[in-house]
Amino acid sequence: MFSESDPYVVFLRQNQEKTFYMKAWGGNCGDALIWLGTEQLLSDLGIRTTLNPAQADVILIPGGNQTMYQANIDVWKAVWAKWPDKEFVVGPMTAYFDSTTWVEDVQTTSARIIGMFARDPISYANLSSCDFGRDIVHGLSHDPALYLRDTDFIERQKEGIREEHTLAVFRADSEGYCIADQRLQWLFRSMPEALSRRMDFRLKARSQASKIATAAERSAANGNLKVCDISRHTIPFFFELLRTAKTVHTDRLHCMLAAAMLGKRTFAYPTTYGKLEAVYEHSVKDWATVEFVR
């Protein structure tokens, strides 16, 4: 993982003499781990960074679930408008269609986009299928948070490992449920907006409650089930609850990744886009075991 032949590493080395500015975006602990992993990767590659975009040659969005939320794409567009002279790169991300305007925006902008990378094979296939009308380097890499796996950061977290509770970490947004039947997907998209909002609210609540019930049933022998979406809290709190968990049940990608890096027994649950399964198959299964609950 992140070997010298990794396309993202190759690309960064090819641009090693440039100064990078890492552009922040709204998110949660998962995005913070992506940020920390990218910082460490750039440092280890000897790439200069700056906190002043005016002094940068390249503005880098480190990666994550960028294309699923229009607010993230609006960050891209704001960068393009404010810093048209800078080169622009998106690190390893989920690249899916239909949720935002990202493909059209990339096709129509005059911004100097030089690289876009995927963190799973499905996203890479989607990126590769896009006709952006320009020469943008793209490649399949790994979620940047995983670069922390063999660093002092994770080793220090391991110093505090204990087994005090079973931890259930489940999202309460629209990514939390999965509609497998394509006919139901079509029906849901065809509903009037007011009705679809009500259905979305009910599906989110029902999915989260079902997952919590499954986690409780599986942890009955262990007792002390702690239910908390730690991804919405601080990094220290996030890792404290992970360090002290005996087992972890989650539908949060970076909770799964962090638990795996800590060596915790981990149960992963499906989400709307299958991103946990995709990242696990591509980046995790060779060094950690995660049991997927269907």
Image: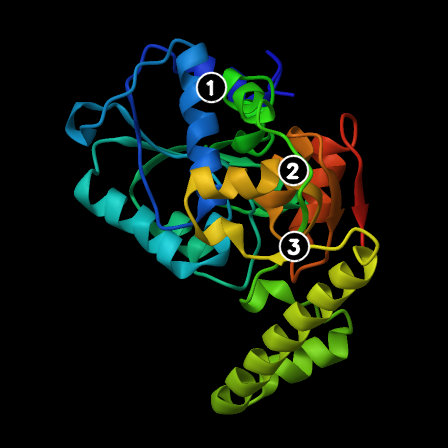
Q: Nearer the viewer, residue 38 or 216?
A: 216
Q: Which residue is mark 1?
A: 41
Label whose residue precedes the other's in the sequence (2 or 1): 1
Q: Is residue 254 visible?
A: yes
Q: Which residue is mark 2?
A: 259
Label whose residue precedes the other's in the sequence (3 or 2): 3
* Residue 77 percent across, percent down from the top left: 29, 50
Q: Residue at x 45, y 58 (%)?
A: 69
Left or right: residue 46 compared with residue 91:
left
Look at label 1 and name its amino acid: Leu
Q: Quadrant of the N terminus?
A: top right
Element carrying mark 1: helix
* Residue 147 percent across, percent down from the top left: 55, 24
Spatial CA span between label 3 and label 2: 12 Å
Spatial CA span between label 3 and label 1: 26 Å
Count residues near mark 1 (Cα–Cα under 10 Å), then give few for <14, some for 14-19, many for 20+.
Answer: some
**Residue 54 location, quadrant:** top left
Element carrying mark 3: loop
Spatial CA span between label 2 and label 1: 21 Å
Q: Residue at x 79, y 55 (%)?
A: 219
- In this picture the colour scheme is rainbow
In this rendering, the answer to whether 82 lies above or below 173 is: above
Left or right: residue 105 compared with residue 124:
left
Count residues near mark 3 (Cα–Cα under 10 Å), then give few for <14, some for 14-19, many for 20+.
Answer: many
**Residue 112 location, quadrant:** top left
Question: Disc count in the image?
Answer: 3
Circles 3 and 1: CB atoms closer than 8 Å? no
Q: Residue at x 39, y 16 (%)?
A: 15
Q: Quadrant of the C terminus?
A: bottom right
For discs 3 and 2, the disc positioned in front in the rendered view: 2
Q: Which residue is mark 3?
A: 251
Q: Nearer the viewer, residue 53 or 14?
A: 53
